[in-house]
Image: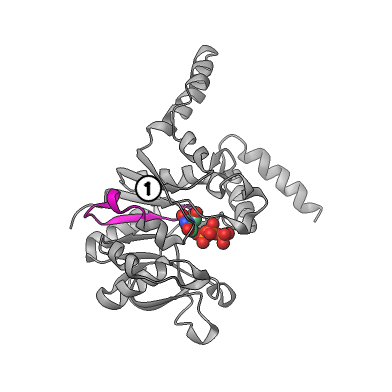
Amino acid sequence: MKKIRKAVIPAAGLGTRVLPMTKVMPKEMLPIVDKPAIQYIVEEAVRAGIEEILIITNRGKGIIEDHFDHAIELEQRLEASGKLQMLEEVRRITDLADISFIRQKETKGLGHAVSCARSFVGNEPFAVLYGDDVIIGEDPACGQLCRAYEQFGKGVVGIKEVSPEQILKYCSLAVEPLGDRLFKVSDMIEKPHPDQIMSLYSILGRCVLPPEILDIIDETPPGAGGEIQLTDAMMTLAKTQGMIGVDYTGTRYDMGNKLGVMQATCEVALRHPEIGEDFREYLKSLAATL
Ligand code: UTP
């Protein structure tokens, strides 16, 4: 089975759940301490062995492109003032991976965003890392899914059990355990009604898909919210070819909702080499007043 070399990061959504912050600033650029969310996602893909990345953006998200580009004036200033460690850090962002960008011209849903990657994907399987889902862990989640694809030769979804309230807002999967955090996935439904729930397992943030998914998306009519849903296309794949679910290790932070942003910020700050200790003391003293 061929190694997964390519990844697509859809980052063209409107981010309405984190308004007004996202009126101008893309949610993928929200900071987690000192790096924007999308940098953590690119770093995860790179650690998983991905060589080429396509980020799907839209109007007003040029700031994402700028973040991964050289900032010549800044680099010259850092060099001249001898701030070499910071210079190296700033340059490292540009050299992280071979990153390209394409615009989704209309916000027609996650499925539609992925279909914008057709010429980038070509005839290879590819990973999808949702631009607002940051997953932090020792073993990159994307790599865990790529290994499952290479093992089974089928589309793979990253899954987690969620609460009965959350499942109504996400998607619900029909799963059968295969052992070792792996599952057979035979069906799924986006934003189920209570009587359509098949399990509390939902797809959270990552998948690895065969190139045929792009033809399936083209045939998929708009679904929940009037958007072309990736879940609807993956449902066809699951029903016809079967898919694999990986209950990945690592903590997922939903940067598309306000609580998720705060959880990511607090937990990453606690482990941060520069401010971790001071932040822990601050948090303890704050907690004592609650
Ligand atoms: P979401 O459904 O969470 O994005 O999509 P959204 O539409 O921005 O969210 P709300 O409900 O308005 O707050 C998950 C990922 O897919 C991207 C988003 O940028 C996000 O990273 N996406 C979504 C696109 O690239 N294009 C779309 O048309 C929709």
User: Whole-percent x and y of residue 148?
Assistant: 28, 62
Towards the viewer: 88 or 182? 88
Q: Is residue 133 visible?
A: no
Q: Secondary structure at mark 1?
A: helix
Image mark count: 1
Residue drawn where x is 29% and y is 48% of the image: 120
Amino acid beneath label 1: Ala
Residue situated furthest bottom in the rendering: 195
Towards the viewer: 188 or 104? 104
User: Whole-percent x and y of residue 83?
Assistant: 53, 19
User: Whole-percent x and y of residue 75?
Assistant: 49, 21
Q: How is the image coloured?
A: one colour
Q: Is residue 144 visible?
A: yes
273 falls in the magenta region = no
Relative horizontal placement of residue 56, taking residue 51 as reference (left or right): right
Q: Which residue is mark 1?
A: 45
Check disc 1: other Cα within 10 Å, few if <14, some if 14-19, many if 20+.
Answer: many
Determine the image quadrant of residue 128.
bottom left
Q: Is residue 39 above or below residue 173?
A: above
Determine the image quadrant of residue 14.
bottom right
Residue drawn where x is 27% and y is 48% of the image: 5
Towards the viewer: 257 or 215? 215
